[in-house]
Image: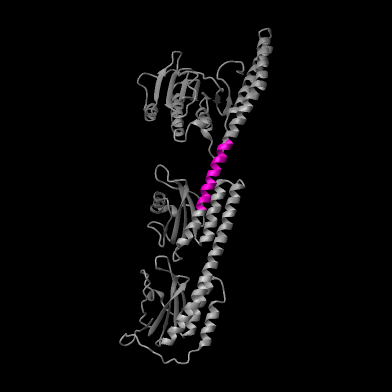
Amino acid sequence: MRYDIGGTGTITSDGARLDVDRARLVEAALAVASGSELEATLHRVVEAATALVDARYGALGVLGADGRVVRVVEVGSGDRDRIWDRNPGATPVAPPAARTFLGVPIRAGDVVFGNLWLTAQDAFTAADERLVQALAAAAGVAVHNAVLLERARTRERWLEALGDVRGEVLGGATTAEVLTLVATRTVELTASTSAVVLLGPDDDGRYRAVASAGAPPDAPSVMPGVLDEVTESRGPVLGARPPAGAGDPAGPWLAVPMLAGERVEGVLLAVRPAGADAFVPAEVPLLTSFAEQAVLALDIAEKARAQRRLDVLADRERIAREVHDRVIQRLFATGLQLQSALRRTTDDDVAGRVRRAVDQLDRTVRDIRASVFDPQPDDGDPGLSRALLDLVARAGAGSGIRVALHTDGPVDTVVGPDLVPHVLAVAREAVANAVRHSGARLVTLTVRAGADLVVRVVDDGMGIRPGAAGDGLADIVARARDLGGTASVERRLGGGTRIVWRVPLDDDLDGDPGGEHSDVPAGPAPVEEGGTSAAAGRAEGPAPAGH
């Protein structure tokens, strides 16, 4: 179409150009088709069109799936903000400084890829319009071929990146390494300034950035509206402009869910710089496939951690059996022999040496048990037993009071992550209360996983005074009530205080073998704290408790 915007503003027919230079059209068509790169092809189309009809300014507006102009390729002098109306349909607006402008669509296959607009000082003729239309037809073929080639190359790059990620997953890389690679490849393949893998939401609706590339990990996490929309819809969300609060200079963005079945594990978010081309629907499945790899990495890592836990537990059981059957039995027999010899000697010096030897054997047994039953940290998740050991270590350090720990049953496997904070809070408050106020020499913390989870703290101090329960003990009772359990605080007949906290477990395990009021449980011996050293063994008795 041609517009004459001078004078009356009417459309005119100008057939004065009778000698059309067909050679220039052929030359322009050949120039357009001379390459395969999409970006270079678009520039050649605009350059060839402006040269063909002596236009002052040319622009090719690439349309998105919704008919909006998503990018503009320009040649010559002009102001595209005065040329393009970015409403659907991309209606051209004639610049006041131009006498005329000419617009033709460029079709790539059956789709209008974009519109070519040309401006000049002199009016375009009908011959000019025919030349540009012919060039647009040739350009459409070239653009279509370039688009197909670009898509093929893009798929090839994404497949190569997917192969890299899968190789890392299967090669035993850590979860952090795999997710960081996902974010890095996302930045490279989407021309983004940042990509972030966020896990969540948690119970408070918060998301946690676990891997990123480009911008700092917390930069896109200020887009809670986008993340919530992805989580609720379980589908991709993309936008041309940053949501409110996204910060500057954020631009177009694409967020896809990390799905594990019907459950959303997190969100993979890519953000381009301000003014960059918007994401197009064709890019969604590519980024979605990357999100699937992130979920796969998380799943494999979790299964690997679970397998390692099982291996460690099996290894501990084997070692414990061997230690009990061989080493501890021999040490126990040696201790009995020394105690028997002690009764036959009248030499005080010899008796003292024998007693010290028996004590040394006792400590050796405790050290051996500590090495067997003390769980080691695993991938940053130390488990309940390790946390309890740390708790008694801190409670006993510098207090002059010995703090012992008994654990019985599979406390590291059957106590879920939601219950662990309650167990630690109860144990911490009860032990701290005994250390501060009881005047005890020994405080024993027992944690047993059976049909119920039982936390028991016993001290040999002065005993609790009637009505002396403070806020800390009230919190212990409240936690038990909230979890459907019970809690009791009572004086012991032999002196001291006993606190028993019991809550149900979902697992169908054996019951409480030692009874609710047993002071020293069956099973592995305690870990004791005296100052800064820790050892595993029973709190009482001069001889090694070997069996």
What residue is drawn where x is 38% and y is 19%? 465
Q: Residue furthest front?
A: 110
Q: Is residue 55 visible?
A: no
Main SS class of the magenta portion in the image: helix
Residue range highlighted in magenta: 290-308
| For residue 513, above or below residue 195 | above
- Numbered label tally: 0
Residue 93 versus residue 145: which sits nearer the camera? Answer: 145
What residue is drawn where x is 56% and y is 39%? 305
| For residue 276, above or below residue 374 | below
Q: Is residue 94 visible?
A: yes
Quarter-of-image position of residue 18: bottom left
In magenta segment, residue 398: no
Residue 156 versus residue 270: which sits nearer the camera? Answer: 156
Residue 14 versus residue 324: which sits nearer the camera? Answer: 14
In magenta segment, residue 295: yes
Q: Quadrant of the C terminus?
A: top right
Q: What percent of the width, then of the height, locates residue 34?
A: 57, 77
